[in-house]
Amino acid sequence: MRRLLAIGITLTTLLGLGLFAGACGGGGGDALTLQEFFDELVALDDKSEEDSAELEAEFDALGDEPSVDEAVDLLEQQVDIIDELVTGIDDLDAPDEAQDIQEAAVDAGRDAVDAFRSGVDEARDAETIDDVFLLFDTEELNTAFDAFDAACVDAEALAAENNIEADLNCGE
């Protein structure tokens, strides 16, 4: 069960922290300054982290031997948290210097959400928790994680180049 939680929390962390690197400039209004962009990302990340912590408490409450249905229901909620985060980032109107990074991160985020949701859908038919674990060790999901790491590193570099403090915990 802890491995399932780790998968969901890791994905949320990569999306929440790694996506500081980006999301598409879909806001349509005046572009944010780079500082405002990073401030908005922090706010989105904080909400995502809070929601994930609440979900982690629910996972813990299931004990050592949760049913497949209980675990899958919570994993589905984790996908919703991730999707909400990606959508929030996508809605930001990034400044010019962050738009490419933002776009790459949102693309990776959508890929990760799709891969994670596919795993959740398949997990509904799993017979054991171990079977559920196996469904989340896919090349597609690993590729999405790699894309988030790359976006995170790019975002930290952009922030540093502009004297913005942004420890995005890349690779954690």
Image (cartoon, rainbow, N blue to C red):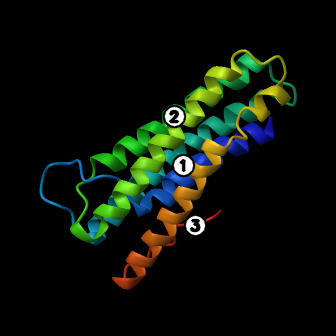
Marks 2,1: beta carbons within 8 A? no
Measured from the top left, where is residue 170 in percent x and y? 58, 66
When the figure is inspected, residue 162 is found, relative to residue 28, above or below; the finding is below
Seen in the image, is 3 located left or right of residue 31? right
* Mark toward the start of the polypeptide (3 vs 2): 2
Point out the tag, 1 or 3, that comes first from the N-terminus. Answer: 1
Horizontal and vertical percent position of residue 127 = 82, 16
Compared with residue 127, is residue 141 higher up or lower down, i.e. above or below?
Answer: below
Residue that badge 2 annotates: 114
Outermost residue toward the left in this view? 30
The quarter of the displayed image where residue 32 is located: bottom left
Q: Which residue is mark 3?
A: 170
Separation of residues labelled 3 and 2 (CA atoms)? 22 Å
User: Residue at horizontal 60%, vertical 47%?
Assistant: 11
Image-based side of 9 in relation to 30, left or right: right
Disc assigned to residue 49: 1
